[in-house]
Amino acid sequence: MTEPAHLRTPPDVLADALRPGLPPADPSGSAEPTTRADAPQLAAVFRAHHDFVWSSARRLGCPPGSVDDAVQEVFLIAARKLDQLREPAALRSWLFRTTMHVVRNHRRGHRRREDRHALAGRDAPDHTPDPSHRYEAAAELLVLLDQLDEDRRAVFVLTAFEQWTAPEIAGALGIKLNTVYSRLRSARELLERAVLARGRRP
Amino acid sequence: MTTRPDPTSELERLIAAEAAVTPSAATRAANWAGLHARLAAAPASAATAGSSSGLAKLLVVAAVAGAAIAAVALVPRSPAPVTAPAAAAGPAAPERAAPEPPVLEDMPSPPAEPGDGSWDPELVHLQRVHAALRAGRPADARALVDEYGERWPDGVFIEEIEAARVLAACATARDAAARRTLAAFLRRWPESLYGARVRRSCDPP
């Protein structure tokens, strides 16, 4: 949920990291001319939630070469709904659910391409190499997550990586609290079984 | 004879490894540029659909005005997060034609509402606790946790609240008192879904 202050990235560091190519911060705080004065601003939404959307897309199973496309599509959709996305907690929930939809579409497209390649006799997988695969343990987890269906995967990702509680997940995904608990338990059981099955590397 | 790690610990190890992977600054910048290009290519009809503010205005503002940046506290899960190389971003989006996003017939409508309204006030309170934790205000979180206990002694989310109490205690100081709070939680809920998380929060730095 949180980390001690010494582990957190200071806000100005992130702001500096984002500055190239991004609009400069407006010290006067003048708002973007959206219709509603309390509507969030696209740049602020992007800054605050980019990493969340990027990581969620990756963990929800977006094909490695499509993660950045998916991220941009999520924020493009968000840009059209800024007027309706005023409440911060609801915004994050909405971004996650939208990421689920966008990732689902990318996965469908990816499967179709793989099927075409299989028909054409190509046996090489249509995967853009992902340099992050050098991080072996992280890549192992993504492989294991592929064994979960979308519903269990979403609940597991929000719990394990975003530290959302079961009630928050129930609210965000519009499911019952008991459903969250049961999906989470079965996801963990499936993953632990998969961990055992794959054995332990020396 | 080699000893196999228990699957729970091994799964936690893999989760920690994945949690440490974050996008690089270059990836963020490339995605902003890609989004910018797609907004620029969006047809005028799309720009006004569903929002009288319009994407054209948004684009102008994104280009020249900038936003007041809320203090964004990115919380890396590890003291030394692994940053995905910029190359992972692939070619920057501005180089290609900017297509419309896929049509999503069942796109959710914002904002989300809790599934069961009966516990809304408790959920709102729990979210305030978590917001305080995320903002690095464990003292506020503890005060809210105490308040929850007073307002809802038989609250639906008591397990979540007590887990938050451990997180707040360990965020304040990973000392004997925090460990006692952790131990009390684990005694009361030995099979808690939050067990691994609260344990991690009290691990030595």
Image (spheres, rainbow, N blue to C red):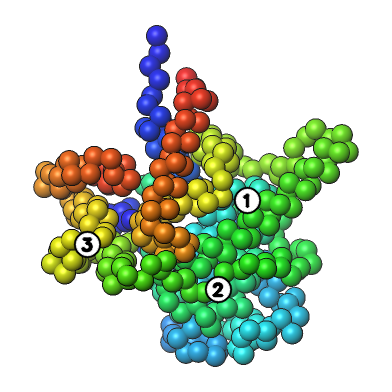
Coordinates of residue A114 in the picture (x, y in percent): 77, 43
Residue bearing the label numbered 3: B155
Of the 4 image quadrants, the one containing the N terminus of chain A is bottom left
Kind of element beneath mark 3: loop
Confirm whether circles 2 and 1 share one chain.
Answer: no
- Between the residue at mark 2 and the residue at mark 1, the CA separation in whole angstroms equals 22 Å
Instruction: Report which quarter residue A117 is drawn in.
Output: top right
Kind of element beneath mark 1: loop
Q: Is residue A112 above or below residue A29?
A: above
Query: Which chain does tag 3 point to?
Result: B
Query: Which chain does tag 2 point to?
Result: B
Query: Which chain does tag 1 point to?
Result: A
Coordinates of residue A166 in the picture (x, y in percent): 37, 55
Disc 1 residue type? Cys
Residue bearing the label numbered 1: A62
For marks 2 and 3, give the one nearer the viewer.
3
Sequence-wise first label, 2 or 3: 2
Residue bearing the label numbered 2: B109
Coordinates of residue B21 in the picture (x, y in percent): 49, 47
